[in-house]
Amino acid sequence: MRTSDVIVIGGGFAGLTAAITAAGRGKQVTLMTSGAGTLAIGGGTIDLLGYLEDSTLVDSPRDGLSRLAADHPYSKVGGQAVADAVQFFLSLCQEEGFAYTGSLDSNHWLATAVGTLKPSCLVPLTMDMTPVKTASHVVVAGFTRLKDYFPELIIKGLSKIPGYQKNYEQVVIDPGFVGGRDVTTLDIARWLDTPTGQQACFEQLGKHIRPGSVVIIPPVLGSRPNYDIRNKLEQALACKFVETVIMPTAITGLRLRAMLLNRAKKLGVNIMEQAHAAWAVQDGNRVTAVVTSNIDRERSYTTQAVILATGGFFGGGISADPDNVQEAVLHLPVVAPPDREEWGTLKLFSGAAQPFAKIGLKVDASLRPVDAQGRVLLENVYIAGRNLAGYDYCLEKSGNGVALVTGYTAGLNC
Ligand SMILES: Cc1cc2nc3c(=O)[nH]c(=O)nc-3n(C[C@H](O)[C@H](O)[C@H](O)COP(=O)(O)OP(=O)(O)OC[C@H]3O[C@@H](n4cnc5c(N)ncnc54)[C@H](O)[C@@H]3O)c2cc1C
């Protein structure tokens, strides 16, 4: 199919959200992506706004929105669009049988693998810490040879946090894997997908469970986007499970990606994987076709509109060399401090926003690219996700939040 109403470039969270939104409105959508995006390795939580630029903690993302700068992507699209995107996402997850919990009114605080708490807005049901808050006995489970996961670190950290001084017990479950390499959470999740894994986990954990126990566990409760494994084990063991935030790669991101791909396919989105968008054909200030290049040849795909969700520096959508900062496909101007000395601040770990993290494309309220004077450059192009200028997702904890809100808005506007 070489003709679409909308071409989405980029298959990360922003691109998938945009494609699903546009296809849900009856548009014929082609999504072309050269890779899987950070969603496939990330935590799969929707961090909307955890901190302001000066590191002030945000209890309620809804309240925090009004304190953001005018060039922040949330300010560009407005508070109502943020609220609509959150509702859209929660409904989508519910409909797909993989419900998330959360609201704009307050952040969740999630347990990390190093025993700290991390703010996030919308989270899988398995990460909700509410059961831990009310439990008296908490089993912290690890797995033999699981890389970078130490239950004792979690216990040590959580025990110092007010409200989390509990009766902790450490348990190491042995999946019995043989062979040389380190074990990953994906290995364990796939093992727990099987009746053998579930039975072994049940037997090894069972003797530590008391009435009302809660088990803190790495994100391993099944590799698929549903809660079947958690439900089975909770029923069998009569306890509650809570999954932690871990270093990449995390199954929680893979589950979310699988759910979004399922939805996109159901809506008839034409998904082109390993498709590298190289350049675009323009007619005046409209893009009329996107050209992909591969080892064999170039191919042209005509379209009425384009959503550019190529992930900024991290995704490959923006690159920098000693002389230039460039947007790779449409050659749009990138907003960056002119002096490279100003790209970073020396206060690396003191909670200051990093100027390089805010480098990106400038847009109008509809997410169309604009020049320094605010004039729209391409009338039928919309920018989403990490390509956008004006926010430091690492500091703010707003990565998937901006991807969701701007992907959704771009999908509506196209
Ligand atoms: C390790 C890690 C973990 C994270 N965990 C979380 C988390 O748990 N919660 C959270 O809120 N945020 C998290 N983030 C941040 C968050 O993942 C990102 O901010 C957000 O997902 C960005 O989405 P995106 O779609 O804009 O970009 P990306 O995910 O980078 O996707 C860009 C896509 O564009 C494709 N692409 C690029 N150029 C082209 C081209 N020319 N042609 C075709 N395709 C192209 C790429 O292959 C990719 O598929 C994490 C980030 C990292 C790095």
Image: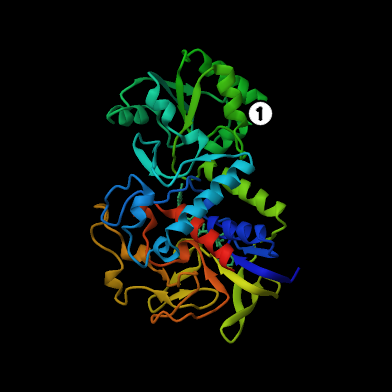
| Position in image of residue 37 (x %, y %) | 54, 56
Which quadrant does the C terminus fall into? bottom right
**Residue type at mark 1?**
Thr
Please name the residue shown 35% across and 38% down the image.
117
Can residue 72 be seen here? The reply is: yes
- In the foreground, 22 or 145: 22
User: Please, is residue 185 above or below residue 316 in the view?
Assistant: above
| Position in image of residue 47 (x %, y %) | 43, 48
Residue at the disc numbered 1: 194
Please name the residue shown 70% across and 65% down the image.
28
Q: Would you call the spot at circle 1 few (<14 residues within 10 Å), some (14-19), or many (20 or more)?
A: few
Image label count: 1
| Position in image of residue 42 (x %, y %) | 49, 48
- Please, what secondary structure does the residue beneath circle 1 have? loop
Please name the residue shown 55% across and 78% down the image.
379
- In the foreground, 182 or 234: 234
Which quadrant does the N terminus fall into? bottom right
Can residue 273 be seen here? The reply is: no
| Position in image of residue 320 (x %, y %) | 42, 72
Quarter of the image for residue 301 reads bottom right
User: Please, is residue 21 above or below residue 327 in the view?
Assistant: above
